[in-house]
Image: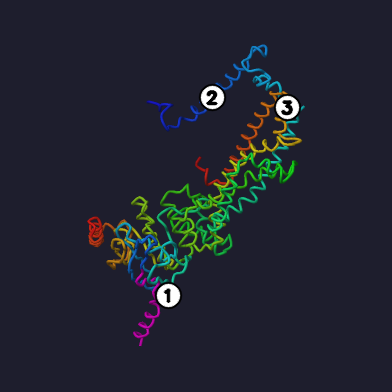
Amino acid sequence: MTEPSAQGAASVTKTPIVEFKQVSKTYETGYTAIKDVTFCVDDVPDHMEIVGILGPSGCGKSTLLRLIAGLTPQHPATTGSVEVMGKPVVAPGADRGFVFQDYTSFDNRTVEQNIAFGLECRGMAAAERMELAREWIQKVGLDVKRDAQKYPHELSGGMRQRVALARTLVLRPRVILMDEPFGALDPRTRYAMQDQLVSLSREVQATVFLVTHSIEEAVFVGDRIFIFSNAPGTILSKMEVPAPDRPAHVMQREPSFLEIAFSVRDIVEGLEMSDRAGT
Amino acid sequence: MSSAPVFALRTTPSLPVRQAAGAVAIAIVLLAWLLLTNGATPEARAISPSVFPSPGEVLKGFPSLVTERNLVGGIAASLNRVFLGFGLALLVAIPLGIVAGSFRIVGAAAQPISLFARTIPVAALLPLTLQMFGIGELQKIMFIFLATAPFVFHDTARAIVAVEDRYVDTARTLGAASSHVMTKVLIPLALPEIYATVRSMFGIAFGYIMLAEVVDARAGLGYIMLQSQRRGMPEHLVGTLFVISGLAFGIDALFKFFERGFFPYRHSND
């Protein structure tokens, strides 16, 4: 009696959180960034996925993120459909948070005011939103007393990206889109940020799409990896990888991890070689 | 240990060296002024005292400039006209510039008119404002308004346009509506640039008022200079010039002082 009902429950909860159907994007210049991209990431309670996206430079990885976010000029897609939680994407919204590679903290706002920005737009009372902001300052590893009143130019690159992460996560989005967020950080800070991303995205129950050039980063944080072909980008390979269950600096030194990373590297380097050869 | 050569291309000397260079330049000009106006009799001087006074004559003429020519009242009259005319320009041009920078279609519509207004020679505004507003105070205020408003509008719109798209994209993905993007992103991020425009345009407006005050003014620094020239008192004329420079410098220093308070995030590391 219990088995059929369990199956029934699974079928009810397995709705796609993000679904691409034959999506292509060609700009007015005639350049095609992505072509016929199709994938589906399900919304499974208590098992939110992190999808690592790898591929050669200029293969349309960022285009994919911006299409999910609904940001122009990538949005709308030229052909195909982009759906989030079963509905077509029409515009950006706080349900799809975005952490950019460039530092995008608002220069005129302190750390806590930056983190409270989205809450302020929602109309939350000042005392309430500042309390939440301070809570998230701690969660991303910053110090409320020392850092809350600092302006962005007083922060290191790692601290700025922690603020960007907190500013997104405080809104508890269903989807988090990250475009090379840790690309400019030193290795130690990068490990710390990877660990933080994994734990915090699980806490807010968000599905993460992480574009990165670091194969180790994608293999570590990802439950799944999409490997893109050369431009016009299309998904060449979808791989399931072990979910992160230990700290980044430990797991990324283990032979089993390195074996997976090397196999992914072979695929990506093969793509880059074929691009250089013009094939 | 070797120090960088002072005359190296695109090399910034240390602050003391820069200050010394400025002091030397002032000393050279003062020395030249002293030499050209030195002599026991007018005939013995390279430049006659009726053409240009010596530094000593300017200093000696200063008390009478204050008492007989009502220097303080002149300063107040000139500043009052600048504050009214320029204040009106800010009230009108900044909001319009924000709208033109935020909505590109409004910016495109305003562009040809803005270009036309900015290319009118400032001297040509004098007969135009006399024709339109008569010869009283209103003409002087409107002269300042018309001479500065197009530039404030243009620079404000440009500052808004210059806010990078990544900030707007970020705000959108944090749930900001268009009104939030304008009030919480575009305006605050453009404000330091707009303030810099206001600061430099105020200095220009202060210079322009002299032009307006040569026509039927009853008071003001331009009026004092014109009267000094007509009465053959070059020491008052040159003395007023120094007062104008001192005032402009003081007002600019005030703008700079307030800038630190308004935009602490731009200067904390200075």
Amino acid type, label 2: Ala
Q: Nearer the viewer, residue B151 or B82?
A: B151
Q: Position of residue A192 (x, y in %)?
A: 37, 55
Amino acid type, label 3: Arg
Stretch of the chain drawn in magenta: A1-23
Q: Nearer the viewer, residue B259 or B218?
A: B218
Q: Is residue A2 magenta?
A: yes
Q: Nearer the viewer, residue B19 or A276?
A: A276
Q: Secondary structure at mark 2?
A: helix
Which quadrant of the figure contains the C terminus of chain A? bottom left
* Distance from the alpha carbon under mark 3 to that under mark 1: 84 Å
Instruction: Identify the residue at image location x=28%, y=63%.
Output: A229
Mark number, residue A86: 1
Q: Is residue A171 above or below residue B247?
A: below
Chain under disc 3? B
Query: What residue did someone put label 2 on?
Result: B25
Chain under disc 1? A
Residue A225, located in which quarter of the rendered image? bottom left
Q: Secondary structure at mark 3?
A: helix
Chain under disc 2? B
Query: What residue did someone put label 3 on?
Result: B230
* Distance from the alpha carbon under mark 3 to that under mark 2: 32 Å
Q: Is residue B177 magenta?
A: no
Disc 3 and disc 1 in contact, CB within 8 angstroms: no
Amino acid type, label 1: Gly
